[in-house]
Amino acid sequence: MEPSPTRIEHPFIASDLGRIEGHQVVASGYTAVWATENTRSAIFDAFKRKETYATTGPRIGLRFFGGWDFGEADGRSRNPAVLGYAKGVPMGADLPQQEGDGAPSFLLAALRDPIGANLDRMQVIKGWMDAEGKLHEKVYDVAWSDGREMDANGKVPAVGNTVDIETASWSNTIGASELTSVWTDPDFDATEPAFYYVRVLEIPTPRWVVYDKLRYDIELPAEAQLIHQERAYSSPIWYTPPKG
């Protein structure tokens, strides 16, 4: 899979069980940790407490905290980490025991890669188990760029597309350099175990196959996907109902 004019022609996997074409392969991503200092022991401590997130390649900055008393004003803070640790728990942790009858609230903050694409939106993905033991999952759009309006189904329309296939480029004329928000679960049931994690999407950018097309002047398969949205995704925050 090293860069070459012919690498796209070689299947990644081909056997009696199936085939994955070269153009279907995605680039490697990054794993990030929020450590107290840049030392081996502090980084391993961050791994152990699961205060980690990953990206599909860009160096997106992502913070995610959960608690019971984050307010709307907290989403406008210029230092969300200070508030997050003071009022809640970070990604990878368990929510503390519920105080009162309210739903959990979450503080989210994302910053684009300094040399990368702007951000489209932040989403919270919630998973939960109902009283019958069935698992469910739902995606919530929480924060987004460009003043778009959420529809009646709770979905935000696409951000748009500035990709130029011929030059393998895009423009940061859409999207946002940062997104922050406080979100409270509107469907919370205190009796149901649940988890929450954050997904941050960039605006559309060219896939690696488009760069190969430009560099090597090659033809791409008609079925090759040319555009995608890079992303970051956090470790979850867990909710466990009280016993008894």
Image: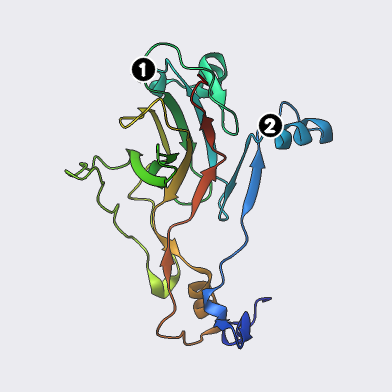
Residue 195 at x, y percent in the picture: 49, 36
Residue 2 at x, y percent in the picture: 69, 76
Residue 44 occupies which quadrant of the picture? top right
Disc 2 and disc 1: Cα gap in Å? 26 Å
Residue annotated with mark 2: 49
Residue 119 at x, y percent in the picture: 41, 46
44 with respect to 239 (left or right)? right
Helix, strand, or loop for circle 2?
A: loop
Helix, strand, or loop for circle 1?
A: loop
Residue at 26% from the left image edge and 46% from the top image edge:
156
- Crowd rating for badge 1 (residues with CA inside 10 Å; few <14, some 14–19, many 20+): some
Q: Amino acid at mark 2?
A: Arg
* Residue 92 appears in the rendering: yes
If the image is split into quadrants, where does the N terminus sit? bottom right
- The first of marks 2 and 1 along the sequence is 2
Query: Looking at this view, is 176 or 240 the one in front?
Result: 240
Residue at 53% from the left image edge and 33% from the top image edge:
237
- In the depicted structure, whether residue 181 falls above or below residue 112: above
Q: Amino acid at mark 1?
A: Gly
> Is label 2 in contact with label 1 (beta carbons under 8 Å)?
no
Query: Looking at this view, is 188 or 43 the one in front?
Result: 188
Residue annotated with mark 1: 102
* Residue 120 appears in the rendering: no
Q: How is the image coloured?
A: rainbow
Residue at 38% from the left image edge and 56% from the top image edge:
171
